[in-house]
Image (cartoon, rainbow, N blue to C red):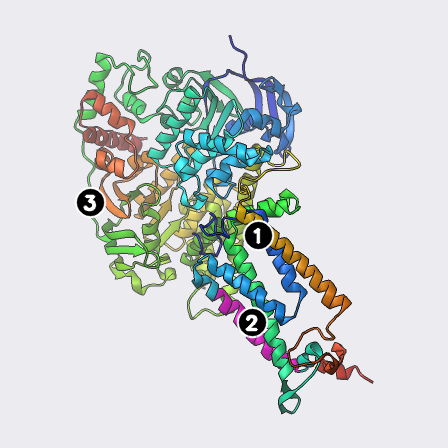
């Protein structure tokens, strides 16, 4: 047996500013060349665990360590962050912040610069590292020209600068579109296998990580290790539900179909998992069984694009000849890769930019005659990061801001604010300082701030980004209530295929400035060409249906219909 | 993104662009010292021409440069000179050393030397503007940082420079997004009906989320830098500081020559054999020049006299 490269013994850690330890009773051995997935909900301690390995703890975040953590035969607390960085390379979640150089080459050279390596020695390393991640042609690019996925590749090349043995990836999939995410998972896997590195990935997107095999999964919960198992064992247990991790869709489908999971071999790999005759029959039955279709009512359109094109200062068209209608009470997912024109479309709806050609009608009125402020009374735009929207100290004031700015009488403001707070489940917290609530609650505050103006349309930009399954479910339930009970039209701008499947009726797909598809979610997600053009990814349901020899579109549709009946009965 | 703020992030193709950061920073520092050291038009004009030639040689996008020059420069100079004319018409006498009056009306008068004075100051400012432009156009922020470091500044100071440039476009982007969302909520930031004061006041509201997002970013960047060994050693090398070429050696020699000439000029014409007034003037002989105590000519000084 090889010596472990990382070893925790009765380890615990408490942040200086906190009363209770964030990590406790950690006993863990990681061997060279292993690929480990650390799974856990927000606040489970998974990031803290990794910061103990790379030295951010205790050298950047102070606190109290008990027990021992040995990395590459050295006790971390007696080492230094610099010494540890020679062994452990960390790719942070925010690949934008990680990009400190002003060009790709400079960023990759950063480690070597700090090691006082002469420039002539750096060049071959830069070349080799960029080649490894497939970014060699981009050597002179500046960060502003790169997509999220490309920045992440540069970040990987950047931590390779010195000969690290362990690579830590902190939520590598957080800001990538589905296809880029898939590429990232494949790249991480290749690095682990061909470069013989020990790889530790922190993620809560289990299904996406299982696209390539993982040796071991460490499930974190409540500051300690809850399970240290193989992926197959984990999927067969009910630990996922207990610790708030979303299970893969195909697994959900198998459970719905009543399959016996204990006997399935290779459960964690959809391509090689063995389906017994009995399970196959159950699944086929599940996917083809006719159910009551969801009844649809067509309402009048609230929003209409007529031949809309847009460009900045006479440049290339960012959006070209867009025609679309959005109906009252609809839930629509606007999907497409970064730079495809999704956000531009949202900005056009909000009136912060105006069409170069064509017209946009809001409730039948041409938007070109309306000010941003007037449009704001009908359209509420909720940005991805709530911190970029909050300007007041107290929740109540934040929610009432739009009305205060419109100089409404105080009683009127109070009435609307209270109503919005109640709708959003924040009434009890109305006098709390905004800083004292969690990220997910802040998100609610920003939605409530929009609701105070009683808009018809809510646009949510990546509502679930950076959140675990539990707060994801909370937010989506809340948004669905706004839709069902208050009749709000909801537009989601999102990369998240789960979100689209579970919570929307229609998907509008953008690619290269054009609207390439507008159809039912299951139709869009089973169309190979659309998936490729929009940088989406086939869901595991698609793959499962293909394996069973069933029409994927029908399979996804039946799954959605079944899931919605289950949800309404819950 | 290139040239939108006259900042280049990647080196351009011309001779000056290709120099190393050290050469550029050194040339800029010596050039600035030379321009500061003198009010002598016989030296300022060649310096101005050199810098203008540098700017032209880089084939820049003239639009932002012209706008900057017209708005910040010509306007300021114009307003400044009118104020000067009103407040201190004797500026010519004080600095050039004589007065040949061209026009007079009561307390206000215009002298040949006053015009000479504002002309020389304008040339001097234009020369510094051209020198700053030449430097800004030629240098990427990373070259700036590495060049400064090589000139002897501590590297932690130098990285601040390049990090600032790294984050400016991101912050600008955040600002636009935050502004848009606040405008939808009804904050009035544009439009003819809104007073300038109100626009300013409302912009201040935007600072809260701006600062919070910026702080979050700072923490992340600091961690990212720590994890990659920033601050490990007393020195560091720079990828941006490429090897010196033949062009670099020529420019470095010229820089040294310029430096020596500047020192020679200052020693010679300021201390050993000084011209009797601050400004050299073609139509004045040294014996015509009067020495004036500057304070005597300020219009409010009369109240303090006696």
Mark sitting on residue A96:
none
Q: Residues within 10 Å of mark 2 (few under 14, many from 20)?
A: few
Residue A516: percent from the left, percent from the top? 23, 44
Mark sitting on residue B251:
1
**Region in magenta:** B67-89
What residue is disc 2 on?
B76
Q: Quadrant of residue A291?
A: top left
Asked if residue B26 shows in the view, the reply is no
- Residue extending furthest toward the top: A1
Q: Mark 2, chain letter? A: B
State whether discs 2 and 1 lie on one chain. Answer: yes
Element at label 3? loop
Q: Who's the residue at 35% across and 55% down the image?
A: A350
Q: Who's the residue at 36% across and 38% down the image?
A: A477
Q: Quadrant of the C terminus of chain A?
A: top left
Q: Are the residues tagged 2 and 1 within 8 Å (C-beta)?
A: no
Q: Who's the residue at 73% across and 83% down the image?
A: B288
Residue A124: percent from the left, percent from the top? 48, 31
State whether discs 3 and 1 lie on one chain. Answer: no
Q: Is residue A503 left or right of residue A286?
A: right
- Distance Cα–Cα, label 2 vs label 1: 33 Å
Mark sitting on residue A297:
3
Element at label 2? helix
Mark toward the viewer: 2 or 1: 1
Any magenta on residue B68?
A: yes
The residue lying toward the viewer, choosing from A160 and A186, is A160
- Distance Cα–Cα, label 3 vs label 1: 76 Å
Any magenta on residue A540?
A: no
2 or 1: tag closer to the N-terminus: 2
Asked if residue B190 shows in the view, the reply is yes
- Distance Cα–Cα, label 2 vs label 3: 65 Å
Mark toward the viewer: 3 or 1: 1
């Amino acid at each position: 047996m090889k010596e472990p490269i990382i070893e925790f013994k009765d380890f615990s850690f408490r942040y200086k500013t906190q009363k209770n330890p964030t990590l406790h009773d950690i006993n863990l051995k990681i061997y060279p060349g292993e690929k480990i997935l650390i799974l856990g909900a927000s606040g489970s301690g998974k990031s803290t665990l990794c910061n103990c390995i790379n030295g951010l703890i205790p050298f950047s975040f102070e606190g109290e360590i008990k027990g021992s953590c040995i990395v590459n035969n050295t006790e971390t607390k007696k080492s230094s962050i610099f010494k540890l960085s020679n062994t452990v390379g960390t790719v942070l979640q925010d690949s934008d912040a990680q990009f400190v150089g002003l060009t790709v080459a400079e960023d990759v050279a950063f480690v070597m610069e700090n090691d006082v390596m002469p420039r002539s020695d750096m060049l071959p390393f830069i070349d080799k590292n960029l080649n490894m991640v497939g970014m060699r042609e981009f050597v002179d690019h500046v960060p502003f020209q790169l997509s999220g996925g490309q920045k992440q590749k540069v970040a990987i090349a950047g931590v390779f600068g010195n000969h690290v043995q362990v690579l830590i990836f902190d939520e590598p999939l957080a800001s990538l579109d589905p296809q880029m995410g898939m590429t990232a998972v494949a790249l991480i896997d290749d690095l682990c296998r061909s470069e013989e590195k020990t790889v530790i990935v922190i993620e809560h997107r289990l299904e996406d990580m299982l696209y390539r095999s993982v040796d071991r999964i460490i499930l974190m919960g409540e500051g300690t290790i809850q399970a240290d198992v193989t992926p197959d064992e984990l999927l067969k247990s009910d630990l996922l539900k207990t610790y708030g991790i979303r299970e893969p869709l195909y697994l959900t489908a198998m459970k719905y179909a009543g399959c016996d999971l204990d006997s399935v071999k290779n459960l964690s790999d959809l391509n090689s998992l063995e389906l017994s005759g009995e399970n196959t029959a159950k699944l086929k039955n599940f996917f083809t069984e006719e159910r009551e279709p969801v009844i649809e009512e067509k309402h009048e359109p609230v929003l209409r694009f007529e031949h809309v094109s847009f460009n900045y200062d006479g440049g290339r068209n960012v959006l070209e000849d867009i025609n679309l209608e959005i109906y009252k009470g609809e839930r629509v997912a606007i999907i497409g890769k970064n730079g495809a024109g999704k956000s531009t479309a949202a900005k056009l709806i909000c009136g912060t930019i105006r069409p170069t050609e064509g017209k946009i009608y809001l409730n039948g009125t041409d938007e070109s005659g309306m000010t941003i402020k007037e449009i704001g009374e009908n359209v509420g735009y909720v940005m991805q990061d709530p911190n970029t929207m909050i300007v007041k100290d107290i929740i109540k004031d934040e929610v009432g801001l739009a009305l205060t700015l419109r100089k409404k009488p105080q009683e009127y403001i109070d009435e609307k604010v209270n109503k919005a707070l109640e709708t959003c489940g924040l009434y009890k917290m109305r006098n709390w300082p905004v800083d004292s609530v969690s990220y997910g609650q802040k998100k609610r505050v920003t939605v409530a701030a929009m609701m105070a103006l009683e808009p018809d349309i809510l646009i949510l930009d990546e509502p679930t980004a950076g959140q675990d399954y539990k707060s994801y479910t909370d937010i989506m339930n809340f948004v669905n209530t706004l839709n069902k009970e208050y009749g709000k039209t909801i537009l989601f701008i999102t990369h998240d295929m789960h979100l689209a499947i579970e919570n929307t009726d229609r998907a509008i797909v953008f690619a290269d400035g054009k609207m390439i598809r507008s159809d039912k979610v299951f139709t869009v997600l089973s169309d190979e060409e659309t998936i490729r053009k929009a940088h989406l990814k086939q869901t595991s349901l698609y793959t499962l249906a293909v394996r069973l020899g069933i029409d994927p579109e029908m399979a996804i549709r039946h799954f959605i219909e079944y899931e919605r009946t289950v949800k309404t009965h819950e | 993104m290139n040239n939108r703020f006259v900042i280049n992030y990647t080196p351009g193709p011309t001779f000056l662009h290709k120099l190393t950061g050290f050469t550029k920073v050194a040339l800029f520092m010596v050039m600035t010292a030379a321009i500061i050291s003198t009010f002598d038009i016989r030296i300022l004009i060649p310096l101005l021409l050199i810098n203008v030639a540098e700017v032209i040689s880089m084939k820049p996008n003239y639009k932002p440069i012209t706008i900057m020059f017209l708005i910040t420069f010509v306007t300021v100079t114009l307003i400044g000179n009118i104020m000067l004319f009103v407040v201190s018409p004797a500026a010519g006498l004080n600095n050039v050393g004589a007065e040949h009056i061209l026009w007079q009306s009561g307390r206000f008068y215009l002298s040949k030397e006053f015009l000479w004075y504002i002309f020389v100051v304008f040339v001097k400012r234009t020369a510094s503007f051209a020198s700053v432009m030449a430097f800004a156009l030629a240098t990427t922020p990373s070259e700036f940082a590495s060049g400064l470091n090589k000139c002897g500044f501590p590297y932690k100071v130098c990285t601040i420079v390049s990090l600032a440039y790294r984050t400016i476009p991101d912050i600008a982007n955040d600002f636009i997004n935050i502004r848009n969302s606040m405008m939808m909520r009804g904050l009035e930031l544009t439009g003819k009906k809104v007073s300038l004061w109100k626009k300013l006041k409302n912009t201040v509201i935007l600072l809260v989320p701006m600062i919070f997002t910026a702080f979050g970013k700072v923490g992340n960047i600091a961690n990212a830098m720590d994890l990659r060994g920033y601050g490990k050693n007393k020195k560091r090398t720079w990828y941006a500081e490429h090897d010196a070429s033949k062009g670099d050696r020529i420019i470095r020699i010229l820089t040294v020559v310029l430096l020596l000439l500047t020192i020679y000029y200052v020693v010679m014409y300021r201390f050993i054999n000084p011209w009797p007034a601050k400004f050299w003037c073609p139509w004045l002989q040294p014996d015509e020049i009067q020495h004036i105590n500057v304070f005597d000519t300020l219009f409010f000084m009369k109240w303090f006299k006696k």
